[in-house]
Image (cartoon, grey):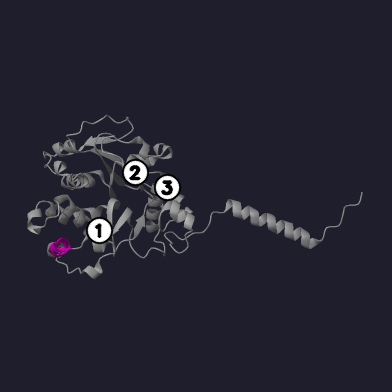
């Protein structure tokens, strides 16, 4: 039986097509980390501003992030805020759930949640709750407690984060943190600033710091650090709510914010105390943004009642 003649160019065409398909399947896409212009719209929606799918595949999965993420809760830890995929990974060890608001009875959390009462952290160091919880300070009270007790120094954390009980986390959040830190350790050419201020949401600075209170806070910041920061030096978007920052930055920010907390009367403002502190934290981070790379995390706020 005589085989049919197949032109050589047809053979080459088939081989080339098969090779292209093979490379497309087995080769990961080449994506520059933190490239906003190159990110697909669907990736931005799914993984956060500046993120692409390459962010979700850490090259070195054994890298220890040395992160402590403090989650403030009131009545109980909400298991539904954390994906099943996250439960089964080593990222779970980075969470520490801190119970606040002693007037609300606590419901015990499952054993795999690391939980502690804010008052217990203070008692270990011979300190006591300052009453800030009753004044609706919540996360800012915890920030002060973590700072005053040297919690981050004792734990050896390189990154420190604060978030509320009703913020939804999944694996994509930690993979994005992971790959961003990996990128900074490799000194990638795309990294023009040190890593990183990770955040969930922002608020326009012109509204966050409007009025006399903004000017007084900036003047107080400059007096504390001996700087001459101007409003033109401050980022146009201030970070609020959830954030994760380098340990050294946290210590620097709280060195000033801690003094604001105990001198609220100096600012002679009708703005409630916890809002003044919120503005102080936002201002300090907005100043740090000029020298630190900023990465938005795909964390969703579910707005759940405190007692649920």
Q: Which residue is mark 1?
A: 285
**Label located before the other in sequence (3 or 1):** 3
Query: Which residue is tagged 2?
Result: 302
Can residue 219 be seen?
Answer: yes
Residue under circle 3? 172
Q: Counting other residues with Cα less than 10 Å from the Cα at mark 3, is it few (<14), some (14-19), or many (20 or more)? A: many
- Say which residue appears at 27% left-offset and 53% top-offset: 240
Where 288 sits versus 262, above or below?
Answer: below
Q: Magenta segment, which residues? A: 211-220
Circle 2/circle 3 CB separation < 8 Å: no
Res 95 quadrant in image: top left
Residue 287 visible in image: no
Whole-percent x and y of residue 287?
24, 63
Name the residue rendered at 35%, 35% in the picture: 79
Work out which quarter of the rendered image holds the C terminus and state it: top left
Find residue 96 and report its horizontal and vertical position in percent: 28, 40
Q: Are marks 1 and 2 in contact (CB under 8 Å)?
A: no
In percent of width and height, residue 35 lies at: 43, 62
Estimate the spatial distance between the alpha carbons at disc 3 and disc 1, rounded to whole Å: 24 Å
**Residue found 7% across the figure and 55% down from its top:** 265
| Magenta span: chief secondary structure | helix
Q: How many C-alpha atoms fall within 10 Å of the one at disc 1: few (<14), some, or many (≥20)?
A: many
Magenta highlight on residue 219? yes
Provide residue 115's location: percent of width, then percent of height. 26, 35
At mark 3, the secondary structure is: helix
Q: Nearer the viewer, mark 1 or mark 2?
A: 2
- The mark lying in front, picked from 2 and 3, is 2
């Amino acid at each position: 039986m005589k085989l049919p003649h197949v032109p050589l160019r047809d053979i080459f065409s088939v081989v080339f097509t098969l090779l292209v398909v093979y490379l497309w399947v087995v080769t990961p896409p080449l994506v520059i980390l933190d490239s906003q212009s190159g990110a697909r719209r669907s990736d931005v929606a799914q993984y956060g501003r500046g993120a692409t799918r390459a962010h979700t595949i850490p090259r070195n999965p054994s890298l220890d992030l040395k992160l402590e993420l403090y989650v403030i809760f009131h009545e109980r830890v909400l298991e539904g805020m954390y994906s099943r995929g996250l439960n089964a990974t080593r990222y779970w060890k980075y969470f520490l759930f801190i119970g606040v608001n002693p007037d609300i009875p606590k419901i015990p959390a499952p054993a795999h949640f690391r939980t502690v009462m804010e008052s217990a952290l203070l008692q270990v160091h011979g300190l006591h709750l300052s009453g800030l919880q009753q004044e609706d300070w919540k996360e800012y009270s915890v920030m002060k407690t973590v700072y005053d007790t040297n919690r981050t120094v004792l734990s050896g954390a390189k990154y420190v984060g604060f978030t509320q009980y009703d913020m939804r986390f999944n694996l994509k959040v930690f993979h994005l943190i992971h790959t961003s830190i990996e990128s900074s350790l490799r000194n990638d050419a795309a990294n023009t600033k040190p890593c990183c201020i990770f955040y969930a949401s922002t608020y326009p600075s012109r509204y966050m710091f409007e009025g006399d209170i903004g000017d007084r806070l900036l003047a107080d910041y400059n007096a504390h650090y001996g700087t001459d920061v101007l409003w033109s030096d401050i980022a146009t978007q201030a970070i609020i709510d959830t954030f994760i920052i380098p340990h050294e930055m946290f210590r620097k920010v709280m060195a000033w914010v801690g003094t604001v907390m105990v001198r609220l009367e100096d600012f002679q403002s009708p703005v409630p105390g916890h809002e003044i502190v919120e503005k102080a934290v936002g201002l300090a981070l907005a100043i740090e943004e000029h020298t630190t790379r900023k990465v938005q995390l795909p964390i969703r706020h579910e707005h759940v009642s405190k007692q649920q």
